[in-house]
């Protein structure tokens, strides 16, 4: 029993560390967040933090593993849900957008320059899982007359992510003219209005 409690405690501590590190890394970039910062935020000694993660690189890798696993699980939940096609498409697009934009601009810069191996892995998963499944889903919508026949699935997803990224980096959000959630909602609606047929709204 004590052994089980000990394992549970370690897993919970590890989860707290990964959760807080992910929040800090994604918001500020991992180059500007130290292990000391994370230990202080958690109210944890550095010795305890390093017991769970011997290096900052190991912690960066763990936060990305959690990020990828969570995104894939949520995608599968949407696909296996009882939602109607249009609601499923909307929810999927919001998931893609929120998942991508969860990584702040500085974090994406840090990944590309300091950990290109992780960035490549994210790209590979995006291509093999997200793009592939999204293409199948959009193709199904085209075949059923819900999505316009001239829609290119890969280009749609690229255009959507590019639009979100463009708004994220513009002065619209910086100056508080529009909240990020309102901006993403507007872009998603615009995209859907452009690709769905009249049948989709019936």
Image (cartoon, rainbow, N blue to C red):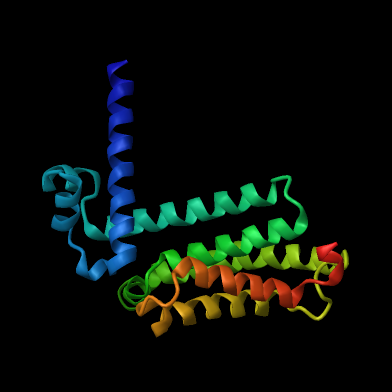
Tell me if residue 82 comes above or below residue 102 in the rendering.
Answer: above
User: Percent x, y for residue 24?
Assistant: 28, 60
Q: Residue at x 87, y 64 (%)?
A: 144
The quadrant of the rendering that contains the N terminus is: top left
17 or 58, nearer to the observer: 17
User: Percent x, y for residue 90?
Assistant: 66, 62
Q: As drawn, which residue projects farthest toward the front?
A: 177
Q: Residue at x 34, y 64 (%)?
A: 26
Q: Quadrant of residue 28?
A: bottom left
The quadrant of the rendering that contains the C terminus is: bottom right
Tell me if residue 195 comes above or below residue 10 in the rendering.
Answer: below
Question: Would residue 10 be found to the left or right of residue 128 on screen?
Answer: left
Q: Is residue 112 visible?
A: no
Q: Residue at x 71, y 68 (%)?
A: 135
Q: Quadrant of residue 137?
A: bottom right
83 or 79, nearer to the observer: 83
User: Percent x, y for residue 150?
Assistant: 81, 81
Q: Residue at x 45, y 74 (%)?
A: 178
> What is the total number of numbered labels drawn onto the structure image?
0
Q: Is residue 91 visible?
A: yes
User: Percent x, y for residue 10?
Assistant: 28, 34
Tell me if residue 15 comes above or below residue 191 in the rendering.
Answer: above
Question: Would residue 195 be found to the left or right of residue 18 on screen?
Answer: right
């Amino acid at each position: 029993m004590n052994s089980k409690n000990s394992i549970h405690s370690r897993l919970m501590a590890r989860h707290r560390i990964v959760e807080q590190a992910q929040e800090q890394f994604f918001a500020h970039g991992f180059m500007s967040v130290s292990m000391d910062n994370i230990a202080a935020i958690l109210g944890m000694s550095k010795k305890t933090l390093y017991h769970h993660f011997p290096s900052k690189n190991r912690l960066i890798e763990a936060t990305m593993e959690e990020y990828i696993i969570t995104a894939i699980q949520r995608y599968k939940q949407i696909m296996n849900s009882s939602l109607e096609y249009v609601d499923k498409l909307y929810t999927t697009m919001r998931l893609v957008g929120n998942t991508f934009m969860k990584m702040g601009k500085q974090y994406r810069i840090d990944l590309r320059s300091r950990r290109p191996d992780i960035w490549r892995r994210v790209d590979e998963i995006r291509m093999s899982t997200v793009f592939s499944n999204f293409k199948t889903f959009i193709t199904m919508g085209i075949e059923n007359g819900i999505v316009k026949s001239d829609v290119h699935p890969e280009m749609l997803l690229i255009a959507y992510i590019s639009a979100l990224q463009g708004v994220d980096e513009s002065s619209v959000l910086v100056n508080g003219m529009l909240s990020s959630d309102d901006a993403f909602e507007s872009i998603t609606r615009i995209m859907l209005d452009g690709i769905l047929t009249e049948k989709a709204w019936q």
